[in-house]
Amino acid sequence: MPQGSPRGTYLEVSESLREKISKGEITEGLPSQSALVSTYSVSRSTIERALAALRAEGVIESVQGAGWFVAGTGDRRPLVEKVTDLLRADGVRVGDRFPTEKELCERFGASRTAVRSVIALMEGQGLIGKGAARGREVRALPVGRGTQTP
């Protein structure tokens, strides 16, 4: 990205991102700020200004702890809610096998650390527990929208 543009470098970055979104090159999550800094060869503050401009226009939205997303796309609920919904699916019963960490990471596009935190929380609530053959199994089904057991 050329420096010192009369339009403002952050506007050039925001225009480039807007174009990638409109062409479908970015469909849900935007690259991390670090990746954008490398891609556009600009400072983090320039990237932050470009993202703020796109947010002000309603093109993108920020999800705390998750990053920037094209507005109106994807499921923004916390990971624990998404994983708990697996126990609300039709046909799930106490004693059923619970997905592995690897399966959850792949399904939700989450880090292993995030998945382990959710599993620990669900184990603490008694929803899942150690099962046969080193796996986990469903111990209780969630009640209502939260992750509380009766």
Image: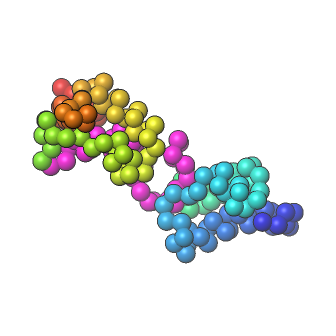
The x and y percentages for residue 14 are 68, 63
The residue sitting at the front extreme is: 133
Location of residue 143 by image quarter: top left
Instruction: Please tell me which residue is depicted at 65% across the width and 55% down the height of the picture.
Output: 35
Q: Image height check: is 73 above or below 115?
A: below
Location of residue 55 by image quarter: bottom right
Relative horizontal placement of residue 127, taking residue 113 as reference (left or right): left
Is 80 contained in the magenta span?
yes
Relative horizontal placement of residue 63, taking residue 107 as reference (left or right): right
Is 46 contained in the magenta span?
no
Tag count in the figure?
0
The residue sitting at the bottom extreme is: 23
The x and y percentages for residue 15 are 68, 68
Give the position of the N terminus as an image quadrant.
bottom right
The x and y percentages for residue 31 are 58, 56
Location of residue 135 by image quarter: top left
Along the viewing direction, whichever of 137 and 82 lies nearer the viewer: 137
Relative horizontal placement of residue 100, taking residue 15 as reference (left or right): left
Q: In this rendering, does residue 127 appear at all?
A: no
Q: Image height check: is 87 above or below 147?
A: below
Q: Image height check: is 112 above or below 109?
A: above
Instruction: Please tell me which residue is depicted at 46% across the width and 44% down the height of the picture.
Output: 111
Give the position of the C terminus as an image quadrant.
top left
Along the viewing direction, whichever of 14 and 29 lies nearer the viewer: 29
The x and y percentages for residue 10 are 74, 60
Instruction: Please tell me which residue is depicted at 63% across the width and 65% down the height of the picture.
Output: 17
Relative horizontal placement of residue 15, taking residue 7 as reference (left or right): left
Q: How is the image coloured?
A: rainbow
First to last magenta residue range:
62-90
Q: In this rendering, does residue 96 appear at all?
A: yes
